[in-house]
């Protein structure tokens, strides 16, 4: 099994529901975004094109972040998920700079102290979610491992109103993701880096 | 039952979203009493598991530490933007007592001294609280900023409240000034899904006409940039091409389903049979006039000039064609800046895509198949002459025969009643311009500050209230407002001419607000009463779902966090204390569709929970009370083909909007008799371009058009208090500042990030320039995301509030519908 | 006409993104690592035990300290030894540890003894690794084309040697140590290294002009953009040109003051050039080119 995601740029409407769904699933602190949707504008008025490009950790199969990690905190699972064991991470951020997609985030000291409303106003939601994270370590998209292990789609996929994110088994030629990649010429981001991303884009 | 649920450690519970005016079905995950996740309910047919970003962020509304937690009393008498009211928590009893005492006194003296601002879209049944109190004032907007020029036209056309193109069958979708399927308007979450399926899976072509590259325009096959307030010119140019150059129109449809063949005399009225008073049509085969329902008619003439009983007349189709003869693409192009060739090309593509003559069989029944349609909303019609804009946008659909047929432009009901199809005069549908509340009876002397009595088709032009409060002599008001009640509304933000509105706030003696988090307006309150949030309250909701019908059930997913109460209960309580409980219960009986044994006794007080239960049983049957909904979640279903397609039960819909003319002429007579100088010139049966439009006649120094817009992230601007939304918004260029085209900015020496002054003839704002490529060079755009200034600590206080630039008087109001002109012209300078 | 993608910060816009995570402290760690290791190597070469000790201390305290300060979880630092098989951080860390132990042994052992010889060889090799591994570390980030070049370790080596030489000269001129080679030889070496470094830097920058768009963007930032003043004045001007000028025209003859000035200038240049290489690192846009 090789889990992966296909992102259909034709469908994506840049609504950022995925961005927020990820926040709500993972309870990440302010400034920490495991996924977001970028605007990409080309041309000059009146011939202008605008694309919305969702980005997240690509769960690369030859992941530089795994390679450079000195502690073994970042590892790749059998099913392709690249995960960080926060208990092992020393916060050296070698992975951070090595990720060609800049998809990692370092939790600074104090990152888990205030919550989104500031002051001493941590919400019950944040109090419930933050124990999952550790200050001083590097975090990133987990492909919603807890959900995926229960056979559910990741949160960003689940909510996407346009069904622009599709999750599935890349090693199964009959899965929806494999078929879409085949039929619509799905491509990986920055193939020149030979990182073998598990995320594919469809134009 | 709820209590048992809340005792569990870990549960999912179904409810309904309320992060915008719509109502997607949700499921909520609660662990150890804390809401940890909100998701779309995958089993619901409406949003099918999907939520938009606002829906995803409900947790941060529920747990916002800035929520109103108890009733509050202001102790700082000084009021103003940024002023700390020095709230003092008080008991419910004390708070209700203060409010009831004040309002009771007003009610006894003159109930018209109360201004009312109740906007809760989920609880439209609360809107009439003011009227039951005895005040017909409306000091807010939900109508004149968006739907005044839209809903009445929909209602007049086919008994609908809104409309949207057919996601399932349309192949060529033109979208003008609306966000359906991409970013706003009807049920965004489900609509984005339907639109994506149509675009990508079925290859539907989308053309978006917008002054800026909206989300829809970005996704469209073609973006047609246009000047604000000129969409009617674009569309009428297309109609001209279809009727005069290409000869593309659905004759069959017009003959059978519209008043297109009805003969119109020189006075613009139907030519009638003197005996039966029925309108005449011309039978082309018999070469004679016959009444429209004469079974012997062989062929309805749509064209030609005839003389019947000595009266010169033409079929209304011919009148329309003749009227629009001079609306050539060349002339229209000069108005709207869309090249004439583009108008021609799109008209041709549209006309061809309509496949006039083709049919489709759905569930065994054959329907006309017209897979091309023009969809539109606020941007296109939010203007003086917006009624005509709206009528023009209907016209282009009607002539290709796509109204309420597969692939076409489909009416959407306000609620589970769907389209209100009732027989009207002359073989036509009964016009339903007043789905929200009945019209106000005409009076020579005004009795509502918004002058609703002089807009017989319109929707409360609440923006006129401020002008009339400040200048009572203009229309002869002899009473003054003293108090204001606000529920789920932000009039200081939502109304135009913000400075005037603020001045009215300043003059009021007493303001009471029912809210969950304070906004620009409710910060000025003397007493604040905390409402439950949606995750803490019960409601059956059903608002404008396209394709779907039925109610979703909103229910508490946890115990209320604070000492809040349901707004319905608060308003019932106040009605009782002030002394109009019977009137209030009477209103509830109508507005909640209560029938038979479920009707409320007028003198008894009912809780919201009881009322909702009665509503459920009234609509769904005795065994479907709230406990059924608790068990089953929702009562939503796809509309049946016969509910969506050709639902008019044999009645005709207008091609020629005779109703508008009739109402206008009647109003003209009444106002003249009352000695009023009132302009009724826009009550036209046929939409035409009118060069008199004030927007396009402002002094030349105001060289740029300006407008405001919503996107998926935003519910108006109120979601900016939600930090997740705010965080995303602060990183997206279109929500970072005032949008200006690169070339325009360059010509004015303005760079990205520069502070600029934006001045209209009516006001000015300061903002930051966001220089982008994807906007018409003669236009600037302002996201609602940059418009706030309330004390809430999360939202960024840019206060670049577009409405400050808008006027708010009768001149700037659409005569026919009461719609405000929501664009203006500005000059900008770097500071 | 397609415009080039913008350089963006955290906003949700596709474009080139600056590397911001490795800056002051990592630059300091690299700096101390290189000059410390360089000094240690020079000291082995010139037989200066004081130099060797100072070199060790610079690496231990300067580099080790900067790394510890930088780590998000310093108390777990030892975990960074786990994966030398793939990670240059782990390799560097190992090299540094071994260098410390063997260097200490080398200083403590009887000169000429077997332990002394063995320790010297091991310390020399690991010091060499400490001197150059930053280069490999940076090179192993495929993400940042400015770093992802075989020139990086070369640059590190030459800068390390230059730093070592300057520091040795400094120690000698201030009478803190004696060396077994002629001082003029040392100062000539310094001049040669300065010239070499200048050439290597130029070659490196030239190689970037054929690089990817992100490399060019980095280059633009360094040579024309916001980092240019610091690059020209501190990294090149002070660090290489001024030092070369001083070393060539005045040199050790100018006395301790001049040597101190040269050393200081050299170190400033050294710190800033790597600091700027770190800061000017640019990631390519996630989805390559703009298309219409
Ligand atoms: N996400 C979201 N959905 C919503 C709401 C919300 O706040 N957020 N609010 C609900 C309510 S009450 C309403 S009224 C609807 C509003 O729904 P829409 O009408 O779809 O939304 P708006 O953004 O107000 O206006 C639509 C578009 O008109 C464009 N526009 C402005 N002026 C002109 C013009 O003169 N001509 C043309 N062609 N375009 C113009 C703007 O750029 C904007 O993209 O949405 C409802 N649904
Ligand atoms: N500049 C600009 N002005 C506009 C528009 C625009 O797009 N741009 N849109 C116009 C349109 S189309 C409309 S319909 C109006 C809408 O204008 P409003 O109806 O005023 O809009 P909202 O922001 O939805 O609601 C107002 C307030 O309701 C409160 N609220 C939120 N949830 C709850 C709740 O659960 N209970 C209670 N009691 N209160 C709650 C919040 O304080 C919120 O600020 O604005 C119009 N004005
Ligand atoms: S939720 Fe889907 S459509 Fe919306 S931005 Fe994310 S990927 Fe795009
Ligand atoms: S995208 Fe970056 S963080 Fe994710 S696996 Fe690839 S290299 Fe690692
Ligand atoms: S920061 Fe943590 S996960 Fe990243 S490389 Fe260092 S130890 Fe590994
Ligand atoms: S897969 Fe999960 S963690 Fe990753 S971006 Fe999506 S929601 Fe966030
Ligand atoms: S469209 Fe409205 S009701 Fe649906 S999820 Fe979004 S905010 Fe909630
Ligand atoms: Mo609205």
Image: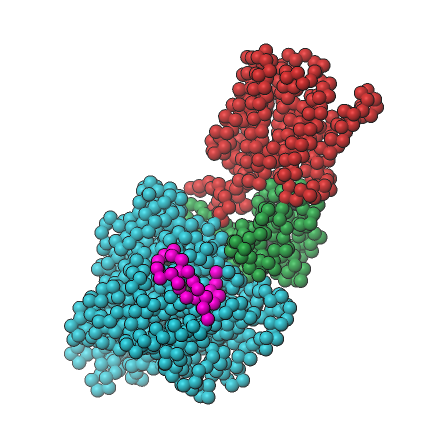
**What color was chain A assigned in the picture?**
green
The residue shown at (49%, 53%) is B727
Across and down, in percent, residue B720 comes to 45, 57
Say how the picture is coloured.
Answer: by chain
Q: Quadrant of the N terminus of chain B?
A: bottom right
Across and down, in percent, residue B510 comes to 34, 68
The residue shown at (67%, 34%) is C64
Q: Give the range drawn in magenta.
A: B66-91
The residue shown at (24%, 58%) is B694
**B427 with respect to A161 (left or right):** left
Total marks placed:
0
Is B213 in front, or is C43?
C43
Residue B758 visible somewhere in the drawing: yes
**What color was chain C assigned in the picture?**
red
Residue B417 magenta-highlighted? no
Give the chain letter for cyan: B
Residue B73 magenta-highlighted? yes
In the rendered view, tell whether residue C160 sits above or below residue B228.
above
Main SS category, magenta section: loop
């Amino acid at each position: 099994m090789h889990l992966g995601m296909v992102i259909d740029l034709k469908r994506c409407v840049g609504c950022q529901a995925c961005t927020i769904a990820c926040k709500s699933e993972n309870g990440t602190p302010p400034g920490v975004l495991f996924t977001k949707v970028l605007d990409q504008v080309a041309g000059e008025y009146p011939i202008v094109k605008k694309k919305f490009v969702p980005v997240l950790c690509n769960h690369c199969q030859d992941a530089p972040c795994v390679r450079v990690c000195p502690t073994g905190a970042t590892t790749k699972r059998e099913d392709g998920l690249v995960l960080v064991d926060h208990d092992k991470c020393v916060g050296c951020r070698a992975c951070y700079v090595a990720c060609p997609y800049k998809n990692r985030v370092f939790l600074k000291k104090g990152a888990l102290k205030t919550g989104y409303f500031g002051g001493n106003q941590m919400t019950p939601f944040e109090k419930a979610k933050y124990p999952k994270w550790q200050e001083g370590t590097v975090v990133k998209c987990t492909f919603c491992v807890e959900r995926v292990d229960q056979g559910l789609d990741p949160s960003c996929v689940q909510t996407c109103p346009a069904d622009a994110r599709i999750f599935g088994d890349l090693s199964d030629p009959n899965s929806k993701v494999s078929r879409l990649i085949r039929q619509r010429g799905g491509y990986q981001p920055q193939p020149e880096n030979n990182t073998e991303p598990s995320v594919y884009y469809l134009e | 039952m709820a209590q048992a649920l809340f005792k569990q450690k870990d549960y999912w519970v179904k409810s309904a979203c309320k992060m915008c005016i719509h109502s997607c079905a949700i499921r909520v995950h609660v662990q150890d009493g804390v809401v940890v996740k909100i998701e779309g309910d995958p089993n619901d047919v409406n949003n099918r598991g999907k939520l938009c970003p606002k829906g995803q962020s409900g947790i941060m509304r529920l747990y916002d530490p800035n929520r109103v937690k108890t009733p509050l009393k202001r102790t700082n008498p000084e009021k103003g933007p940024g002023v700390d009211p020095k709230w003092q928590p008080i008991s419910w009893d004390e708070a209700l007592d203060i409010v009831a005492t004040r309002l009771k006194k007003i009610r006894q003296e003159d109930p018209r001294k109360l201004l009312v601002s109740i906007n809760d879209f989920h609880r439209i049944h609360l809107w009439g609280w003011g009227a039951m109190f005895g005040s017909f004032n409306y000091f807010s907007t939900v109508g004149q900023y968006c739907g005044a020029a839209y809903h009445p036209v929909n209602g007049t056309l086919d008994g609908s409240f809104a409309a949207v193109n057919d996601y399932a069958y349309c192949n060529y979708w033109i979208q003008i000034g609306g966000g359906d399927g991409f970013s706003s308007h009807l049920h965004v979450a489900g609509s984005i899904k339907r639109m994506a399926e149509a675009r990508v899976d079925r290859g539907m072509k989308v053309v978006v006409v917008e002054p800026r590259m909206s989300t829809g325009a970005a996704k469209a096959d073609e973006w047609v940039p246009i000047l604000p307030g000129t969409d009617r010119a674009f569309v009428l140019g297309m109609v001209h091409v279809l009727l005069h150059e290409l000869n593309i129109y659905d004759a069959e449809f017009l003959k059978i389903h519209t008043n297109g063949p009805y003969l119109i005399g020189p006075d613009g009225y139907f030519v009638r049979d003197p005996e039966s008073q029925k309108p005449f049509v011309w039978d082309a085969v018999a070469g004679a006039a016959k009444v429209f329902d004469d079974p012997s008619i062989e062929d309805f003439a749509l064209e030609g000039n005839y003389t019947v009983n000595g009266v010169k007349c033409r079929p209304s189709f011919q009148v329309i064609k003749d009227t629009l003869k001079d609306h050539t693409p060349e002339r229209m192009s000069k108005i709207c800046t869309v090249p004439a060739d583009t108008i021609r090309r799109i008209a041709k593509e549209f006309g061809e895509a309509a496949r006039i003559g083709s049919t489709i069989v759905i569930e065994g029944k054959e329907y006309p198949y017209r897979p091309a349609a023009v969809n539109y909303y606020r941007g296109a019609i939010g203007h003086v002459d917006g009624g005509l804009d709206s009528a023009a946008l209907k016209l282009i659909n009607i002539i290709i025969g796509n109204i309420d047929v597969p692939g076409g432009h489909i009416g959407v009901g306000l609620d589970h009643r769907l389209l209100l199809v009732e027989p009207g005069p002359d073989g036509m549908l009964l016009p339903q311009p007043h789905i929200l509340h009945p019209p106000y009876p005409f009076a020579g002397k005004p009795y509502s500050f918004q002058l609703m009595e002089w807009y017989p088709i319109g929707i409360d032009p609440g923006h006129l209230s401020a002008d009339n409060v400040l200048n009572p002599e203009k229309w002869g008001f002899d009473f003054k407002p003293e108090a204001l009640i606000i529920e789920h509304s932000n009039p200081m933000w939502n109304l135009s001419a913000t400075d005037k509105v603020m001045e009215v706030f300043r003059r009021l003696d007493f303001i009471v607000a029912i809210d969950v988090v304070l906004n620009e307006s409710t910060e000025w309150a003397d007493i604040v009463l905390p409402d439950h949030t949606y995750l803490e309250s019960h409601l059956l909701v059903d608002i404008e779902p396209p394709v779907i019908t039925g109610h979703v059930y909103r229910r508490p997913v946890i115990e209320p966090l604070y000492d809040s109460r349901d707004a319905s209960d608060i308003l019932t309580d106040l009605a009782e204390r002030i002394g109009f409980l019977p009137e209030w219960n009477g209103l509830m009986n109508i507005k909640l569709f209560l029938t038979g044994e479920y009707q409320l006794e007028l003198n008894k007080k009912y809780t919201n929970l009881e009322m909702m239960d009665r509503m459920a049983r009234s609509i769904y049957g005795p065994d479907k009370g709230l406990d059924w909904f608790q068990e089953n979640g929702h009562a939503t279903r796809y509309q049946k083909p016969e509910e969506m397609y050709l639902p008019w039960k044999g009645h005709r819909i207008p091609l020629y909007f005779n109703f508008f003319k009739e109402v206008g002429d009647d109003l003209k007579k009444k106002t003249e008799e009352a000695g009023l100088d009132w302009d009724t010139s826009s009550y036209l049966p046929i939409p035409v371009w009118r060069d008199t439009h004030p927007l396009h006649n402002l002094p030349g120094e105001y060289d740029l058009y300006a407008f405001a817009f919503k996107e998926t992230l935003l519910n108006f601007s109120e979601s900016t208090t939600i930090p997740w939304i705010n965080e995303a918004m602060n990183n997206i260029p279109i929500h970072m500042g005032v949008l200006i085209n690169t070339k325009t900015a360059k010509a004015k020496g303005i760079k990205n990030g520069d502070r600029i002054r934006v001045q209209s003839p009516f006001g000015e704002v300061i903002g930051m320039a966001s220089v982008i490529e994807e906007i018409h060079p003669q236009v600037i755009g302002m996201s609602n995301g940059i418009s706030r200034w309330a004390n809430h600590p999360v939202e960024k206080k840019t206060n670049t509030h577009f409405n400050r630039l808008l006027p708010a008087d009768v001149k700037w109001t659409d005569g026919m519908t009461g719609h405000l002109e929501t664009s203006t012209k500005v000059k900008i300078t770097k500071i | 006409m397609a415009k080039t993608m913008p350089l963006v910060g955290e906003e949700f816009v596709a474009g080139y993104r600056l590397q911001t995570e490795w800056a002051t402290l990592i630059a300091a760690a690299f700096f101390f690592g290189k000059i410390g290791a360089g000094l240690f190597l020079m000291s082995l070469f010139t037989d200066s035990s004081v130099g060797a000790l100072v070199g060790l201390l610079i690496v231990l305290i300067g580099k080790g300290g900067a790394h510890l300060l930088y780590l998000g979880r310093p108390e777990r630092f030892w975990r960074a030894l786990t994966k030398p098989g793939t990670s240059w951080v782990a390799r560097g860390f190992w090299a540094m540890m071994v260098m410390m132990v063997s260097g200490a042994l080398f200083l403590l052992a009887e000169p000429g003894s077997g332990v002394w010889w063995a320790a010297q060889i091991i310390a020399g090799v690991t010091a060499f690794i400490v001197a150059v591994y930053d280069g490999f570390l940076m090179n192993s980030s495929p993400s940042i084309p400015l770093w992802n070049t075989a020139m990086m370790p070369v640059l590190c080596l030459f800068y390390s040697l230059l730093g070592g030489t300057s520091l040795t000269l400094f120690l000698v001129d201030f009478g803190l140590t004696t060396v077994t080679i002629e001082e003029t030889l040392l100062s000539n070496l310094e001049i040669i290294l300065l010239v070499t470094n200048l050439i290597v830097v130029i070659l490196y920058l030239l190689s970037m002009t054929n690089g990817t768009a992100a490399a060019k963007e980095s280059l633009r930032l360094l040579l024309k953009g916001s980092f240019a003043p610091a690059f020209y004045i501190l990294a090149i001007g002070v660090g290489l040109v001024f030092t070369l000028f001083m070393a060539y025209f005045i040199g050790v003859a100018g006395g301790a003051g001049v040597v101190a000035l040269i050393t200081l200038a050299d170190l400033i240049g050294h710190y800033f050039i790597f600091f700027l290489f770190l800061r000017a690192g640019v990631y390519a846009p996630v989805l390559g080119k703009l298309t219409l």
